[in-house]
Image (cartoon, rainbow, N blue to C red):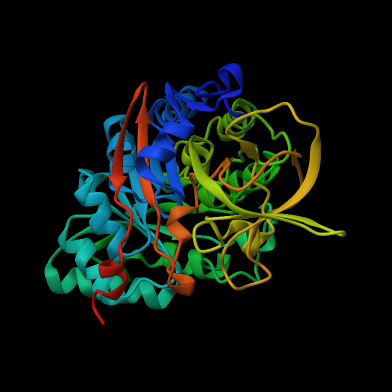
Amino acid sequence: MTENYLSWPEGRGRLEECFLDELADRYGTPLYLYSETGLRRRLGRFRAAFKDLDPLVRYSCKANANTHLLSIIRAEGGGADVISAGELMLALAAGFEAADLIMEGPGKRPDEMALALENGVAFFSVESEAELESLSRLAAERKLKATILLRLNPDIAAGGHQYISTGRKENKFGLTEAEVISIFKAPERYRPLRIGGLHLHLGSQIDTPEPYLKAVREAKRLHASHPFEYLDLGGGFPVVYDKEVTELELFAEAIGRELDGLPVRVIFEPGRYLVAPVGFLLTRITYRKDRPHRRFLVVDAGMNDLIRPSLYEAFHQIWPVRSSGAAPENFDVVGPICESGDFLARERPLPADLAAGGLLLVGQAGAYGFAMSSNYNGRLRPAEVLVRGSESRVIRRRQNYEDLLAGM
């Protein structure tokens, strides 16, 4: 679950070769931590699993767009998919070539698409006919070309929570099959754009290969009458939070078998799979509150730092940085925000002797952690630190109050 870059020698938490209590003393808390070794290994495992397909791997920047992490992914041969002009600028700043980028999202503004065209972005995933007409006009005005992928909404149920399921007909994403066929039949209407293929992203935390296989079958059916070059199956591969998940290699085997004989170049967009398990949130206990009916650990990280438990009722592993061996008791781990929904865990078994000043490590926080953080209640965003072996460095400094007031 924690792979081998997180360990507890003699009961003292360590990320790679850096002790967690020393990182807390050096950089303060709350603090996001990332394992560089872990990130490289995750990407290597992904490539190895799908090696027979030789896919284009385009990391989903929305999971975590820190430019230092993006640079590692780029150095390992990955590209990126971006959802906005801001993510485009971050990807370019991290050194990605525009030819290795896909612009996606259901609400791309004309100015954002124009910026992407002018920077040479290779692919656009199109989600509506109105968007396609706007993109075509923008490209013609600039005498620029681009390849489009038609995002089909196939009405396939997938994803670990209703908010992260994106392939059902009631979701806002994508084109209907009738719209896709209409576009395939009249490509001249959208010159100078080239219709490159289909995009089918179904959701996140997909727990079985079957939704992908259904998507591939839909793609095969359309390919038979309207041949295309690229098939983008998105991301959605699951990671371990509170229960074991289907291994990536089983997804790869099943998808590869279903794709056999289909002459397309496959694109994948892993996000959570790459970064969630290699990121952690380190937090310090401010107060312990024992009541007859409940025990609380009030920590310095809250829903402003990691909103997933509050937003999705998501489970994250939590470990004491110093393991005392004390018998467990149930605690609510709560933050400093003035909301009853501000919690990191409820009724979680943790050592009974935890006290103010102690440190807790929240796992699986590399995806949709800092990326969804905020300044709610006037709280400052935490620092981010990258660990490599026995070395650590700040890859985003902690906010200060001048940052909070900037622009007002």
Image spot of residue 44 (x, y percent): 43, 24
Using residue 333 as the reference point, say whether residue 108 is left or right of it: left
Q: Quadrant of residue 9?
A: top right
Image spot of residue 301 (x, y percent): 53, 55
The residue lying toward the viewer, choosing from 34 and 19, is 19
The residue lying toward the viewer, choosing from 88 and 100, is 88
The residue lying toward the viewer, choosing from 156 and 14, is 14
Q: Quadrant of residue 134?
A: bottom left
Q: Is residue 161 above or below residue 186?
A: above
Image spot of residue 217 (x, y percent): 63, 45
List the single residue furthest toward the left. 143
- Residue at 50 percent of width and 23 percent of height: 5
- Residue at 25 percent of width and 66 percent of height: 191
Residue 380 visible to an observer of this rendering = yes
List the single residue furthest toward the right. 292
Residue 266 visible to an observer of this rendering = no
List the single residue furthest toward the top. 10
